Amino acid sequence: MTGGGLLIAGTTSDAGKSVVTAGVCRWLARRGVKVAPFKAQNMSLNSFVTREGAEIGRAQAMQAAAAGVEPSALMNPVLLKPGGDRSSQVVLLGRPVGEMSARGYFGDLGVPPYPGGARRAGRREDLLETVTDCLAELRRTHDAVICEGAGSPAEINLRRTDIVNMGLARAARLPVVVVGDIDRGGVFASLFGTTALLAPGDQALVAGYVINKFRGDVTLLEPGLEMLRGLTGRPVLGVLPYAHGLGIDEEDGLRLSLRGGVRESAVAPPHGRDVLRVAVVPVPLMSNFTDVDALAAEPGVVVRFTDRPEELADADLAVVPGTRGTVRALAWLRERGLAGALARRAAEGRPVLGICGGFQLLGERIEDEVESRAGTVDGLGLLPVRVRFETEKTLARPVGEALGERVEGYEIHHGVAEVAGGDEPFLDGCRTGSVWGTHWHGSLESDGFRRAFLRRVAADAGRAFVPAPGTSFAALREEQLDRLGDLVEEHADTAALLRLIEDGAPAGLPFVPPGAP
């Protein structure tokens, strides 16, 4: 196998494209295939910094881990980071190149770029050459590249400028497998309708389907699978069962419910007498909320997202995560009474942790002429920190020490923090009383540091909680990725997938009317 490829598309957003792509990568890697993931264009507030200092989607970093390769900017050449309903920061080959409206990106003029000279981002159709060059380089250096689509390939209003679904498949001659989520209902209509809305040249590359999140007896589904094949001329290449706890490194925090969202916690009982309750504040434009996954992996730690001041007050630890809109998040916290709840926690000596944007808003003052252009704004005043937003984005992979333990993390921020005191340094931030703040994402994935931090939190909260000594977040992540590989190996037609990757879509696939212009 040399330079083979496959595009995993989906009937909708959140159909399971990311996890199926990761599962195929893990299955191939276990077979000894040198495989890489690829997503031409990703819209996500959950991002990661590669070792060369490039920013890419966290989903692609997770897929690279599944493939057993180092993440690279080539794997996600275009990353869109929403800054509101109408505009996004465009990150090209790992570096921010400007702010653009949705209309501008899809074919009209964009809003002005950041002040200070950041160049205007290119329109979407202008990026196709960059995207195909990145894919070609990955195919040159790997046996196979498993590409992930975005949204649905049948978004006919966007087909002319598409670079991530059928536009990419046509340009690179990639066979396409479409994933449908049966848990939503209407999976047969979704798979058939997706195919029937594609132009003939696009349909010629759609080689089969995968049904995701099936519950029950698969034999009851088989008549429908045969009828779908009869209607479309394409087989269902796998029916993957519903599996809990596989929604790792989601792309989009905007879909997270403000109330009741619970991160998957370890099944094991607490190591000590008490559980530790963690309340995460789902601030607007929440980014890298995956930081709390390492907390949820600890036996006896229950992680809950909530926007209720009373639930925030009742928790043992309050976490304010990152955000792409620090000033907007500040106003939101004040409107909902959450700012007061955080201030009362600090006054009572009850633990609060701010990460990146959450750290910034816990400070005394924010000067922002870049992100919100709001000028000087008062922060919550819980940490002796002043923040100034710069045009240049900090992208780094720092290594340091805190609480006597080695810590690794990554930084993604425009805000530069000036720390003017505190009881002790804390990574690049500080601690004052029971309030902690740092720009470092991913720090809680360092096992020794996470356990030391939770011991401090438990002491401040008065809980008889003891971190389990043997919890390895990296090992748990590997177990999850292996489960994804198992799903593909055990429930998909792997021989057919290999033929597609090696040989492309078979000739003569029938046209399903009516098609699209």
Image (cartoon, helix red, strand yellow):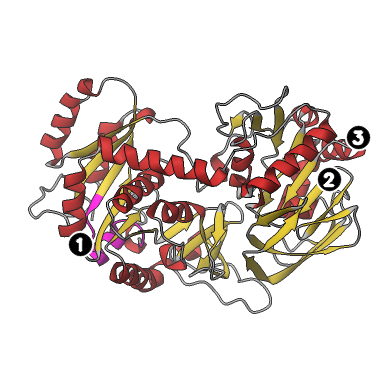
Viewport quadrant of the C terminus: bottom left
* Picture coordinates of residue 433, whole percent (x, y): 89, 45
In the image, 319 versus 88, the foreground residue is: 319
Viewport quadrant of the N terminus: bottom left
Residue with the most extreme front position: 469
- Identify the residue under disc 2: 435
* Picture coordinates of residue 357, whole percent (x, y): 71, 54
Q: Amino acid at mark 3?
A: Glu
The tag on residue 1 is: 1
Give the residues drawn in magenta, as a range: 163-176
Q: Amino acid at mark 1?
A: Met
Residue at 82% x, 31% y: name it. 461
Residue at 32% x, 53% y: name it. 29
Could you tell me which secondary element the residue under label 1 belongs to?
loop
Measured in 3D between alpha carbons, the distance from the residue under mark 2 to the one under mark 3, in whole angstroms, is: 11 Å
Measured in 3D between alpha carbons, the distance from the residue under mark 1 to the one under mark 3, in whole angstroms, is: 62 Å
Could you tell me which secondary element the residue under label 2 belongs to?
strand
- Badge 1: residue crowd in 10 Å (few <14, some 14–19, many ≥20): few
- Identify the residue under disc 3: 348
Q: How many marks?
A: 3
Residue with the most extreme bottom position: 117
Which mark is nearer the camera, 2 or 1? 1
